[in-house]
Amino acid sequence: MFASTHTVALNGAVGHLVDVQADVSPGMPGLTLVGRADLALTEGRDRVRMAVVNSGLEWPSTRRTTVLLSPADLPKSGTHYDLAMAVAILAAAGTLDTAALDACALIGEVSLDGGLRPVTGVLPMVLAARQRDLRRVIVPEPQAREAAMVPGMEVLGLRSLAQVVAELRGEEVPPAPPVPAGASGQILGWRGEDRLEEVDLADLVGMREVRFAIEVAAAGGHHILLRGPKGCGKTSIAERVATILPDLEPDVAVELMAVQSLAGVLDPVRGLLRRPPFTAPHHDASKASLVGGGHPRVRPGQISLAHGGVLFLDEFPMFRADVIEALREPLESGDITIARAEEMVTMPAHSLVVLAANPCPCGNHSADVNGEPCTCREVERREYGKKITGPIADRIDITRHVRPLQPHEYDPGEVPESSAAVRERVVAARERQAERYADCGWRLNGQATSTALRERWPLVAAGQAELDQLVFAGKLSRRGAVRVHRLAWTVADLAGVAVPGVREVHTALRLRSGDPLLADDYHRRRRPVPSRHGEPS
C-alpha cells in the first residue's frame, strides 16, 4: 500500500514543502530511505521504528518499506522529518486512513518511547506550509504557541506519536507523560527587547554632534562608525541607537522571528515582536557566529539576528580579519549568502551596523586623554587602524569622533532629549521615505540604488557639482558619493526639506568625513515636517 504525508525542508529561513511518500509491499523486510537525506535523518529510520513499536502500534516487520522524500533532488537535513515518516508508514500499512492526512503538515522529532521532541525552525516551516495551502499542522506541544503565530493555520500541539495517531483516527487522545526536563523549548537566553527598556538617550548629557549623527543613521538606515578614546561614551551611545528606531513592520517582525526560530532563541510567549533587536557580539566571535554557518544545517549569525535592528561591533579593529572581510556583502546589500558545494543559503541582514573603535590598542592615543599616556608603538597603531580602511570604510556612511565631556562643556541645567522624542522625528522622516519609495523595492534612503537616485531623486545642480569635483580630485570614491547622496536625502527628510540643497550636501559630507558639524546642522532637524512629497517635479 502507498501513503503520503507532508513536512517542510529548510534552506536558511526559506521553507520548501516535502512529500513524505511511503510504500509497504511484499518483499525482503527492511526500511529503505531515499531522497538525499543527511546522517541525522538517516538515523531516523531506527528512531521511527522503535517509536512505533513502543507506542503499541503495529510495525510492518514482515514487509518491505520504502520511504521517499520528494522532491528527491532537494538536500534534506534534521530530525523534524521523523513524525511525517512514522505517520506515512503507518498509513501505508493500513493503520491510518490516508484521507486524514490531506492538507496537513507534520513536524517533530520522535524519541524511542514514542514521545515528540521540539525542533528548531518551526515558525518558517509553518509559514512555508501555509504558503502551499496547507491549513493544518501538528507539532510538538511545547512549540504549539510558536506555530500558532502564523495566521490561518489550525495548530495541534501533541506530546506523543500515540496521541497523533489517535487524533488522525478521530479517537479520544490518550494522556501522555509530562514533557521531560530540557525538552520544553529551545530558548537559549535571547535578550530581545528587555535590554532596550533599560536605557534611554535622556541618560546621556552633551554629545550633541553624536546624537545628531545617530539620529540621521536611524532615520535613513545608515551604518555608522564611532571613534574615540576609551571611556568617552561610544558604547553608551551605541546601546541607545535601537531605542530611537521605529517599531518593526509586521513583515520584518515575521522575518526576524523566523531567523530566531532557526537559531533556537525564539520566545513565543512574547508574541509578535514589536521593538527592534540589539545584538553585540564579542570581538573574539568567529565568522560563522557573526554571519552564519555551521554543519550540517546553516544557522543564522548575529547579523541576521539583528535584522531590522542594530548590530553593534565594539572594539571593531580587534575582530579577526576574515570576520571583517565577511561584512562586505551584508553592509552593501542587506543580505548574507552562504554558499557550499551542495547548497546556497541566503539570510536577511538588514540591520543598522554600529562600529566602535579606539584610536589605538591601549585606547589612550588622543589629545583628549589626560594622565594616561599611550603605550602603543607606532607600528601597532598603524596595524590597528588598517582594519577600518579600504572597502569596509567605504561602506560606512557616517563617521563621528567621540570626545569625553569637558568640564567647560557641562551644563547642569541641560535636559537631554529622551529616546521617545528623537524617535518621533525618526518616524516622521521614515514616513517621508516610505511615501517617496512606495513603488520601489526598498524603504529607506540607505537602501536606495544609485541609478534611482540619479534619475528620479537627483541633488540640486550645485550640490552634485561639488560631489563630482571631489570624485575627480580623488577625495571621494564613486561609492562614497552615492552614500553622501543618500545622507543628503536623510538630512533633508529630518529637516522637512522637499529636495536636498547645497546645505544638506555639506552636512552629509561632514557626517561622512568625520569633520566637526556646524551648530546649524543639528538644529535644523527640529523644524516641523510640513510636506511628505519628496520626489522633485
Image (cartoon, rainbow, N blue to C red):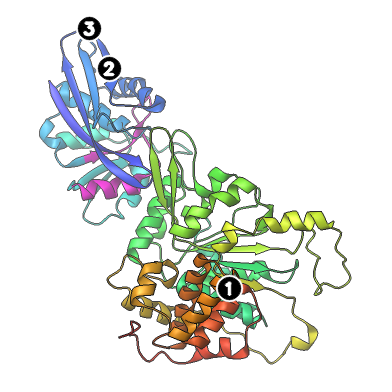
Q: CA distance from mark 3 to mark 1?
A: 72 Å
Categorize mark 3 by other alpha carbons within 10 Å: few (<14), some (14-19), many (20+): few
Give the amino acid at mark 1: Arg
Q: Which residues are magenta?
A: 105-132
Please give the residue where the numbered disc 1 appears in the rendered image.
512
Categorize mark 1 by other alpha carbons within 10 Å: few (<14), some (14-19), many (20+): many
- Seen at 29% across and 19% down, the residue is 53
Please give the residue where the numbered disc 2 appears in the rendered image.
32
Quadrant for the C terminus in the image: bottom left
Of 182 and 231, nearer the camera is 231
Question: Which of the 4 image quarters holds residue 512?
Answer: bottom right
The label on residue 272 is: none
- Seen at 73% across and 75% down, the residue is 403
Q: Is residue 98 above or below residue 476?
A: above
Please give the residue where the numbered disc 3 appears in the rendered image.
28
Quadrant for the N terminus in the image: top left
Q: Position of residue 11 (x, y in %)?
A: 35, 41
| SS label for mark 1 | helix
Q: Per the image, is 48 magenta? A: no
